[in-house]
Amino acid sequence: MHDQIRDMGRRIVELENLGDPGRRSWLWSEEDVIDVLRYHKGTRKVRGLVLKGNNQGHSWETEAFKSMTNLKLLSITGDASVNGSLKCLSSELVWLQWHGYPLHYLPDGLSYEKLVVLDLSECSAVIDLSNYMNQVFPKLKSLHLNDCKNLERIPNCQLYPNLEKLVLTQCEKLVEIPKSIGLLQNLVYLNLSFCSNLKELPDSLGLLANLKELNVSWCETLSRFPASMGRMRLLCYLYMEGLAMATLPDDFGQLSNLQELIIRGCKDLKDLPESFGSLTSLRTLNIQWNSSLTRLPSTFSGLSSLEELDASEGNLQGMIPDDFEKLSSLKMLNLSWNDIQYLPSSMRGLSQLETLDIEHCEQLVAIPELPNSLRVLRPSKCKSLQTMPKLSHLSQLETLDVEYCEHLVAIPELPTCLKVLHAFECESLQTMPKLSHLSQLEKLDVDCCEQLVVIPELPTSLEALRASGCENMQTIPKLSHLSQLETLDVKYCEQLVAIPELPTSLVILRASGCKSLQTIPKLSHLSKLEILNIGNCEQLVAVPELPASLKYLDFYGCRSVPTIPKLSHLSKLDHLDVSNCEKLFAIEDLPTTLKSLKASNCISLQIIPNLSQLSKLEYLDLTNCKWLIKIHGISGLKYLRRLCLRGCNPHSWKGENLADEMFPSLQHSSVPGSKVPNWFMYKCMPRYTRIEEIKNLEGCIRQQVMCTLPRSSDVGLRIKEMMVCFVVYVHHFSCRGSDQFVNLLSKRKGAIVGGTRLRIYQRTHQNQILFYRGGDDLNYEFRLHWLEDADQIEVVVLSRQCEDQLEVENERLEELTQCEDQLEDIDESTEYEDQVEDLDELRPSPCIHLKKVGIHFVYNQ
């Protein structure tokens, strides 16, 4: 509605004079403003003009404003450049906003008698206005000089006696505020935040009798407040974060109208004055991150209007004052991350308290009786806490969070109003209270409660049950009646032998890592189920029929499952993982919606369907499926981003020339082979690259390939993408440990200017072709647009030396003997094992051998 009214008003202004914008009352359209200023079309009818810079480099002369004698509002922002004498501006100006004002001062001789708002923000040229501004601004009410980074002094405050708002934020070189500021009797708002060199405030600040808001946050060198500040009796909002002060003035409590006080991150602040308790109007107090503040003043209970207190992440110690109950208006109390041991017993008298946060109070040993008004209780990470107070009477409690309370052995009876119970990783928790009567409970989280054996009967209102990592839990209660249940997470419950019948409302079922689970219930009726994760259920022997609603299906590591159910009807499935299903013989059908298919290490898998129908497939991993008979349809997968076939029999995709296939979307692939694809520009040939292997002192071997970029003038284009291809070989089973990396470096005149790491997978005993593609998103440290003529792309692999006796194949031996002159005299009649020993003496063998490298560039037009 607001936008419609605005547009309607603008249209009315345009209709004032359609053909001549210089005769309209307001100009804001970029096209109209440029036309009027370029051709000096302005007239006295123009009352307001908005000039926004848009990086087009326009520069204007103030002479263009001379004929706009009735101009009342002028706004110049962005990178708009205006030069010339300011005397050309209208004497009728009421509002002048000029961001990036180019001069060091405002010149004399100008008439500002009617000016109400002056905004010179972001004017880096302005240095010192105190010696140049001598004219009175009788009507000025708002002065903005924020982000004037070179401003050292502001003008004498006598010049604008009616000022109500003064903004000086981020004036980093401002060193002082003039004493004359006390003359601004109408000043309501003063913002000095982020003036990092402001060391003190004048005593005359206390004369600002009408000031309502003061912000001095992050004036990092400000070490004291004037003693007179207690006289600012109308001050309502005071923000003082990140200051260097150690104390507050003794009469601080005289700020009788103060409603919000933020004293956060003042690391040297040691005490709050005893007069603090006189702040009877204070509603919000934040004393967070004050690491030297160890106690609250004895008069603290005098804050009778206080509604919110945040004293978290400080250094409060021992016991909170016992007369806390006098804070009768308190609704939110946050004491998290302090070293307090006890809370006052009088807390039950806080009749308005709704939220109590005491997270990570590691010394806290007990919680006293709590008020009936409490809605949220968070004592999580209180490692010394062993018992909880009575909670059943808390008739408004909705959230209870006792996560990581390592020594908590029991949770007391709970009120019927509870909606959320978090008891994550309560290592000593052995039993749960009765839950069936909690008619509003929506979320129950008992993840990683290792001693918990049984979960009691659950209420019908439950929407999410998370009990993963409960190592001793053997059964879970009846679930079929939970008509609201959407999430069931029982991952890594190693003693769990069965899952009961499930409700039709279920959306997510996660039961991976349940090593004793032998069966799962009927699933076909779960019409809302989208995610099913039963990976690493090693005893599971069968999977039931699946619902058509599934989107994510994970059987990873189900070693005893010989078959999987029909999948073609799963019209929403986009992720399937059957990796490490060692007995799986066949995947008969797949839905056309699939985007990710992972079936690595299925050592019995022989049959998969034709993949050409999977037009949306992006991720295909068949690593080490060495018994696969035929892999059809890979070459037609135009959206494929990742392809892993290492360890597969190359004959299984006979007829599909993967090495020479340039998949348009492929980002990474790993396939068996020993050939860099034909379409790569640069291959491992003496003209372009050289391979060096150097044994270092730590027993590792450095393998290096270097390619020099052509001159861009030879190509006439800039690099858009780079593709890198490696042919690598893993020598022996003893070498197949954790994955290693290839270092991809860009060098200029011998110095490294960028680099990234690409993964090598070691777990396959054969030649592998590894392919990577990337643009400027390849890595933050390796930007293609940085590359210049004659830069070098260097590929470096560091691999440990093989320690076992190596079984070097004939192909490898012949390759090395052809490449190294020093191997030419090896006696071909020598026994095979003797050749290996002689070879090892001449050259140490790396676990990962980098054999060939290809580099290919795609250029922008």
Image: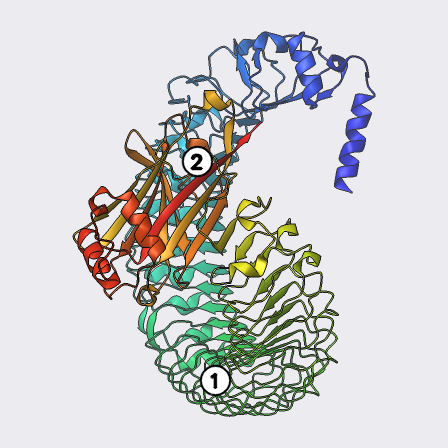
Placement of 480 over or under 763, stated as above or below: below
| Residue that label 1 marks | 470
Depth check: give the residue in front, 202 or 374: 374
Depth check: give the residue in front, 155 or 5: 5
Placement of 174 over or under 475, stated as above or below: above
Q: How many marks?
A: 2
Can you give x and y, in whole percent of width and height, for residue 693 in the image? 25, 46
Can you give x and y, in whole percent of width and height, for residue 748 in the image? 32, 30
Query: Which quarter of the rendered picture does the N terminus lie within?
Result: top right
| Residue that label 2 marks | 682
| Crowd band around label 1 with a 10 angstrom C-alpha radius: few (<14), some (14–19), many (20+) | many
Can you give x and y, in whole percent of width and height, for residue 547 in the image? 72, 75
Depth check: give the residue in front, 807 or 542: 807
> Quick check: 80 left or right of 45?
left
Amino acid type at image mark 2 = Tyr
> Quick check: 69 left or right of 15?
left
Q: Earlier in the sequence, mark 2 or mark 1?
A: 1
Amino acid type at image mark 1 = Cys
Depth check: give the residue in front, 370 or 63: 63
Q: Residue at x 30, y 58 (%)?
A: 847
> Quick check: 723 left or right of 35?
left
